[in-house]
Image (cartoon, helix red, strand yellow):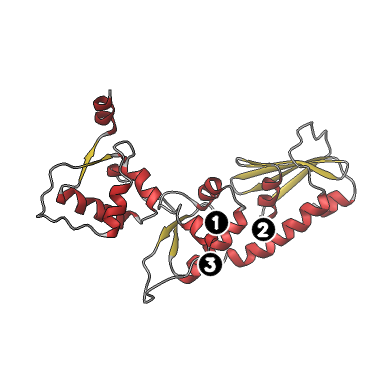
């Protein structure tokens, strides 16, 4: 790319890496458009700049009118180099942004120190969303997210898997506060149980409540089962709840 830009070329670069394809449009020595998968513009160019192998074909042709890049070529290349340096470190533990981060219980340590950046990311970790999907939800820089994931893996509170956990059908059930308490008075509720019940509004399903609490799925379902057995919580299908409200 440096050579193409240095000579003031005008055309389209087609890049192939396995099953992935990317294109970069160049006009008068400047980058005007890039695309790879669902990404376009600068993000697509930065994604392509991380490819360490593949084939490219430069075609001296009209680059077209699509204009999704507005940063100078020099600035793009400097930033691409910076990201490549960061990626060389991050990729030792985060080989792909398409992997799914999952919670890991603390081992040996009684506590963990987190920054706001750490929590902003880890609260969205649900065993189903990939790093890339979490970044979309956060609307943040994917390399900053990669750095946070790298740090949390190093600490030992996250791990990465290729696939997402199958969503438990129970997460689609709507939580309703129960009226048949099966424990002796006075009732005793833990702080976690009280917080859980405070989020129940007879409309949100368990998946939405779990997301709002940021509790790992196994721990959350244990909490739900306990409240249900005591009679403080009932679960119903969304269709049933909709008919009841109607």
Residue topped by disc 3 = 151
The CA span between labels 1 and 2 is 13 Å
User: Disc 1 or 2, which lies upstream in sequence?
Assistant: 2
Give percent across and percent down for residue 209: 35, 46
Mark 1, residues whose alpha carbon is within 10 Å: few (<14), some, or many (≥20)?
A: some
User: Disc 1 or 3, which lies upstream in sequence?
Assistant: 1
Residue 60, picture quadrant: top right
Q: Secondary structure at mark 2?
A: loop
Q: Secondary structure at mark 3?
A: helix
* Tag shown at residue 164: none
Outermost residue to the bottom: 108
User: Disc 3 or 2, which lies upstream in sequence?
Assistant: 2
Decide which of 111, 146 is in the foreground and name it.
Answer: 111
Give percent across and percent down for residue 120: 51, 55
Outermost residue to the top: 246
Give percent across and percent down for residue 24: 74, 43
Q: Are marks 1 and 2 in contact (CB under 8 Å)?
A: no
Residue drawn at x 83%, y 35% is 61
Residue topped by disc 1 = 96
């Amino acid at each position: 790319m440096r050579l193409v830009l240095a000579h003031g070329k005008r055309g389209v670069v087609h890049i192939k890496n396995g099953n992935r394809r990317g294109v970069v449009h160049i006009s008068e020595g400047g980058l005007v458009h890039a695309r790879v998968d669902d990404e376009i513009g600068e993000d697509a160019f930065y994604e392509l700049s991380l490819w360490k192998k593949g084939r490219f074909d430069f075609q001296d042709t009209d680059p077209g009118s699509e204009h999704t890049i507005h940063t100078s070529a020099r600035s793009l290349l400097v930033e691409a180099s910076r990201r490549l340096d960061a990626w060389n470190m991050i990729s030792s533990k985060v080989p792909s942004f398409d992997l799914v981060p999952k919670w890991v219980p603390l081992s040996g340590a009684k506590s963990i120190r987190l920054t706001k950046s750490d929590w902003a990311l880890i609260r969205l970790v649900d065993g189903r969303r990939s790093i890339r999907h979490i970044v979309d939800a956060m609307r943040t820089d994917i390399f900053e997210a990669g750095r946070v994931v790298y740090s949390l893996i190093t600490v030992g509170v996250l791990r990465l898997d290729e696939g997402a956990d199958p969503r438990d059908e129970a997460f689609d059930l709507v939580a309703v506060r129960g009226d048949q308490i099966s424990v002796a008075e006075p009732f005793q509720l833990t702080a976690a149980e009280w917080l859980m019940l405070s989020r129940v509004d007879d409309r949100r399903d368990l998946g939405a409540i779990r997301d709002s609490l940021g509790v790992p799925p196994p721990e959350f379902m244990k909490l739900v089962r306990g409240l249900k057995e005591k009679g403080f919580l009932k679960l119903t299908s969304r269709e049933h709840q909709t008919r009841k409200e109607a």
